[in-house]
Amino acid sequence: MIIRVLGCSGAIAAGCRTTSFLLDGSILIDAGTGVGDLSLDELARIDHILVSHSHLDHVLSIGLLADSVLRVRTAEQRGPITVHALPETLAALRDHIFNGVIWPDFTRLPSAEAPVLQFKPFAVGELLALGEHRIEVLSAAHTVPAVGFAVDGGKGVGWWVYTGDTGPNPILWERLATMKVAHLVIETAFSDEERQLARISRHLCPAALAHELQFLKGSVDVHITHIKPGELEAVMAEIVRLDTPHRIRALTAGEQIDLRETLGGSGRV
Ligand SMILES: [Zn+2]
Ligand SMILES: [Zn+2]
């Protein structure tokens, strides 16, 4: 099981792409600008898109992807790509993006009978079984209805966990306390200097991250995501000063996390 980081920045700039992860080539977790680095063939292999919340930096490639792969998938009779999200998120996508004004309604194109996209709601706590993959929907605490995801890497490996965009989130730590967490991808969108902005926008800053990580047991590989372009060094300088048993580093676009290894745990490739 390989997770490819397509984007992990809080905004765009040259070399910075917004949130998206690709699981084994066929499952996209969030659809930020990083999706645009995939070839048409790679795009056409995506059968599922899991969406953490409705914010633009996590959803803007869904519509563009649908347009790109429509011809290939129709010719190959591949059936629709399933977009999985909370009902509120799916309603937001329908009302504000696939509304015929911002973008066509690809849940009815190229035809209502055989569209390129279909929407499927999930709930927090649900365990999704997508082919051989098991993915649990985790709670997140953001300004709009939001979730995170935990991907089951199997018995010997444990779970790859992505928090989604979130502020302080006690419910998440209660759930993770019962799981073997191999990797935690957690956001730190702001520096401590901007802690007020972090609080209002329900994101984390390094001080808030330190508070949250107290509730993560053991010693875990922690990957920081959603840092704004230009802020990486400042935010990471604050994070490396934290007193924590975890191995913390900044996630980088293009890296891959390998969840297959069972001996000696999982690692980066
Ligand atoms: Zn957000
Ligand atoms: Zn975001």
Image (cartoon, grey):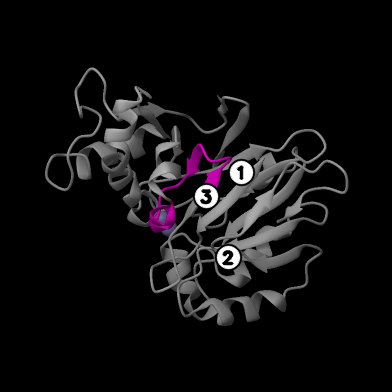
Q: Is residue 77 above or below residue 124?
A: above
Q: The N terminus lies in which quarter of the figure?
A: top right
Instruction: Give the residue type at disc 2.
Output: Thr
| Tag in front: 1 or 3 | 3
Q: Secondary structure at mark 1?
A: helix
Crowding near pointer 3: few (<14 within 10 Å), some, many (20+)?
many
Residue at mark 1: C-beta within 8 A of ligand 1: no
Over which residues does the magenta segment extend?
22-38
The residue wearing badge 2 is 252
Q: Is residue 187 above or below residue 69?
A: below
Q: Residue at position x 55%, y 60% from top?
A: 254
Earlier-in-chain disc, 1 versus 3: 3
Query: Quarter-wise, where is residue 235 in the image?
Result: bottom right
Percent across and percent down for residue 36 are 38, 55
What label does residue 171 carry, if any?
Answer: 1
Percent across and percent down for residue 58 are 40, 52
In the image: residue 156, left or right of residue 223: right
